[in-house]
Image (cartoon, grey):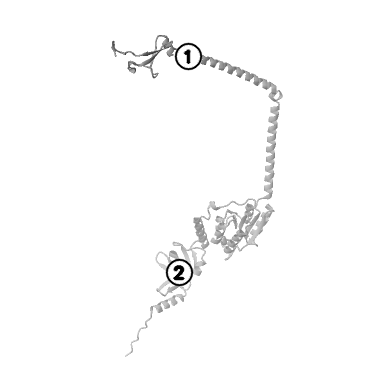
Amino acid sequence: MSAITEPRIYSVSKINSYIKATLENDFVLNSVWVTGEISNFKYHSSGNMFFSLKDNDSAISCIMFKGDAYALPFMPENGMNVVICGYVSVYEKSGQYQLIAELMKPDGVGELTVAFEQLKAKLLAEGLFDEDYKREINTHPHNIAVVTSPTGAAVRDIIKIAGARNKNVSITVIPVLVQGDNAASSIAEGIRLANKLGKADTIIVGRGGGSIEDLWAFNDERVARAVFASEIPVISAVGHETDFTITDFVADMRASTPSNAAELAVNDEYADKKKAEYLVERLNTAFENIINTKRRRLKTTVERPDFKKPWLSMEEKQRKIDYLTEKMEYAAEKSNTAYEHRLAAAAAKLDALSPLNVLKRGYSFTENAEGKVITSVNDVENGSMVSITLNDGMLNAVVKDKVIFDGKEKTEL
C-alpha cells in the first residue's frame, strides 16, 4: 500500500511573489506597448502618478514612478488617449497586478504639442499673456541685453543690424544654452542676470530657427515666468516668422526673427536724422509764414489813411462825439420836461386834497387835550377842554353839553 503524499501549502506572500516573478520574466509582458484612455488619474505628492488605462471592454491599473513622470514634457489628464511602454508586475501586498509605465506619449498627437497647449492654457488663465502687463519698448535705447547663444547666427545678426542702425547703442551679450536639457534653466537665469546688471533698456531673448524640439526651451514654464518677472521690457525673437513659442506670448513684444528684433529694439539713427531735418524744415517754413503774414499786416496798416493822416480820424471821431453829446442833451432836456409836467400834475392833486383848502371852505377839526382828533361826540365828556382849528387860527373851548344826532331826532346829553 503506497503512502499518501501530503499537498504542498504556500503562503499568500509566496504566491504573490511567484506570480510577480512569473509576470516580470514573461517575454511579452516584460516590455509591452499598450494604448488606451486615461481615467482616475492622480498625481501623488510623492511624485508618482496613479491611473487606469481603459478601452471599451476592460481596464488595467497603472503607475508611473517619480523619475519617469518627471521626464514627461506634458501632464497626463483624464480622457487623454495615450500609448504607454512598460512592464506588467504585481503589487504583492494586495495581489493586484498593474502596468508599470516607463514611457508615455499622446496617441495621435505629438507629446510636445500637448505640452505646449497645456502650458499655454495654464499661463493664459493666470494672466501672463494679458495686454495690461505689456510695456512699451524704449525707442531710443542706450544698451540692449541679448540673451542667446554666443556662437549662433542670431547674435551676429543682432549685433550687425543694431550697429548699422545706431552706432551709439551698446550691446551686452549674455551667453546661455538655447538647446538641450539645461537650456531652459540657462535662459531663465540669463534673463534674471540682465535685470540684475540693470544697465539695459531692452532685453532680446531668442535664437535662430529649428524644429519644435530645437526651440522647446522657449516653451518651458521657467523661461515664461522669468520673462514675465523681468523689470526690463523683453522682445522675444525665437526662430522664424512662422514659429510661435510660449515666450512669444509672455514677452512685451514678439519679433518674427532675431534680425527683426534688432530693428524693433534699436532706432535708425539715419532715419531719425532725416526726420529731424524734415521737422526743422517745417519749423523754418512755419516761422517764415508767420513773419510774412505779420509783414503783410504791418504794410496794410501803414498804408491805411488813418495811419498816414491820423488827425482826419480824430476829427471824424470828434464830430461823432459832438453829435452824440447833442443827442444826449436833447434826450435829457426832453426827459426833464416830461418829469416837470408829471410833478406839476401830482402837486395839483396833492393841493386839491390838502386839509388847508378844506378849512378855507368853512370846515374845521377838533382835538382833545391830548391832541387827538375828535371824530365822535362820544370821544369827549361835558366840561372837557378841546381845541378847534379853523382856516385862520385856533379856538380853545370847554364842552358845555353834547347833542347826538340819531336819524332825524336830536338827543341832548
In which quadrant of the rendered image does the C terminus lie?
A: top left
Measure the alpha-carbon separation of dots 2 and 1.
126 Å
**What secondary structure is marked by label 2?**
strand
Looking at the rendering, which quadrant does residue 365 occupy? top left
User: Where is residue 205, by image quadrant?
Assistant: bottom right
For residue 347, which numbered disc appears in the image?
A: 1
Using the image, tell me which numbered label, if any, was put on residue 63. Answer: 2
| Amino acid type of the residue that numbered disc 1 sits on in the rendered structure | Ala
Secondary structure of the residue carrying tag 1 is helix
Residue 101 appears at what percent x and percent y? 47, 69
Q: Is residue 37 left or right of residue 173?
A: left
* Residue positioned most to the top: 361
In the depicted structure, whether residue 405 falls above or below residue 21? above
Q: In this rendering, would 59 be left or right of 280?
A: left
Q: Furthest-bottom residue in view?
A: 1
Q: How many marks?
A: 2
Please report whichever mark, 2 or 1, sits nearer to the chain's N-terminal start: 2
User: Residue 268: where, in percent of width, then height?
Assistant: 67, 50
Judge the density around disc 1: few (<14), some (14-19), many (≥20) Cα neighbours within 10 Å: few
How far across and down, in percent of the image, does residue 406 sit? 29, 13
Classify the position of the N terminus by image quarter: bottom left
Residue 125 seen in the current view: yes
Decide if residue 284 is on the left or right side of residue 213.
right
Of 193 and 374, which appears nearest the observer? 374
Amino acid at dot 2: Ile
Res. 38 image quadrant: bottom left
Q: Tell me residue 265's x, y (percent).
A: 63, 53
